[in-house]
Amino acid sequence: MDYETVLCKRGGNVATDRVLVVDNEEGIRDIIKEYLSPHGYVVDEAADGIGALELIGQNKYALVVLDIMMPRMDGWSLLRELRKASDIPVIMLSARGEEYDKILGFELGVDDYIVKPFSPKELLVRIRAIIRRSAPPLPAAETNGRMSFGGLVVELDSRNIYVDGEKAELTPKEFELLSFLVQHPGKVFSRDQLLNEVWGYDYFGDDRTVDTHIKMLRGSIGQYRKHIVTVWGIGYKFEAGVKP
């Protein structure tokens, strides 16, 4: 099979929430999938490099989590094939923690290297960080740091919020929460996701903190509060098309 041709045919935009886990240990794949899925990721699985290449030829992935020791085609061989035609981010997840293996991995183009046994929470944080770094830039209308939604204006660079021309007084955390939501319009985030993204992955507290700040934020932006939509049983999203 001409793997390079298959990879080149993928084309299109990368799915920002689809991850491929390649590991011959079913238990490892299950752990990763069980941990990532509640955080909004679609997780596909492959037990070896051959199966992974077939999936990569069919789907668009934001990132690949890759083991080294696998049957048929190992992680090194898969990585070499990937780098012939794709710059898809790769996290190497392996029991091989020798310096030589890490150096070889980075020389072949991995974005990160994690040694087993691993923390699923740490893996999640690293996946988020790498996907965030590799994401395409915002459209030109938003890269100037100013985003407008009718009379609601969010200035990301100056950290100012205007409501119908009047500057709104928001707490730092209210601003961070609003700025995060407006940069992901239409996407639903659970309370745990918002705690991780806005408060930091090492935050340990009650998820009612999110509800409290959402209530405060809605009060601060007045009639535009309806842009912040509650998705019952899940969390919140910013809906730009909602009329105040």
Image: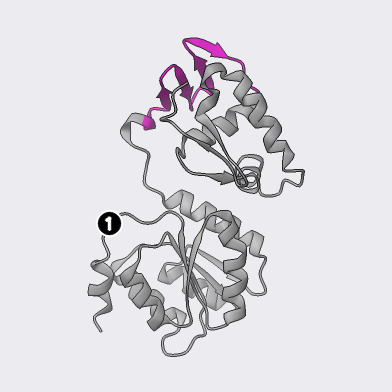
Q: How many numbered circles are shown?
A: 1
Residue reaching furthest to the right: 205
- At x 64% / y 44%, what residue is drawn? 191
- State whether residue 80 appears in this view: no
Q: The residue tagged with tag 1: helix, strand or loop?
A: loop
Q: Is residue 145 left or right of residue 39?
A: left
> According to the image, what is the colour scheme of the structure?
one colour
Q: Which residues are magenta?
A: 142-171
User: Residue 161, position in %: x, y?
Assistant: 52, 19
- Was residue 148 drawn as part of the magenta stretch in this picture? yes
Write down the residue under mark 1: 12
- Was residue 7 drawn as part of the magenta stretch in this picture? no
- At x 57% / y 81%, what residue is drawn? 26
User: Residue 62, position in %: x, y?
Assistant: 42, 59
- At x 55% / y 30%, what residue is drawn? 178
Residue reaching furthest to the bottom: 72
Q: Is residue 57 left or right of residue 201?
A: left
- At x 57% / y 17%, what residue is drawn? 222
| Residue type marked 1 | Gly
User: Residue 121, position in %: x, y?
Assistant: 65, 60
Task: Name the residue nearer the viewer: 78 or 192.
Answer: 192
Residue 198's place in the image compared with 134, above or below, is above
Callout 1: 10 Å neighbours few (<14), some, many (20+)?
A: few
Residue 27's place in the image compared with 190, above or below, is below
Residue reaching furthest to the front: 232
In which quadrant of the rendered image does the N terminus lie? bottom left
Residue 110's place in the image compared with 151, above or below, is below
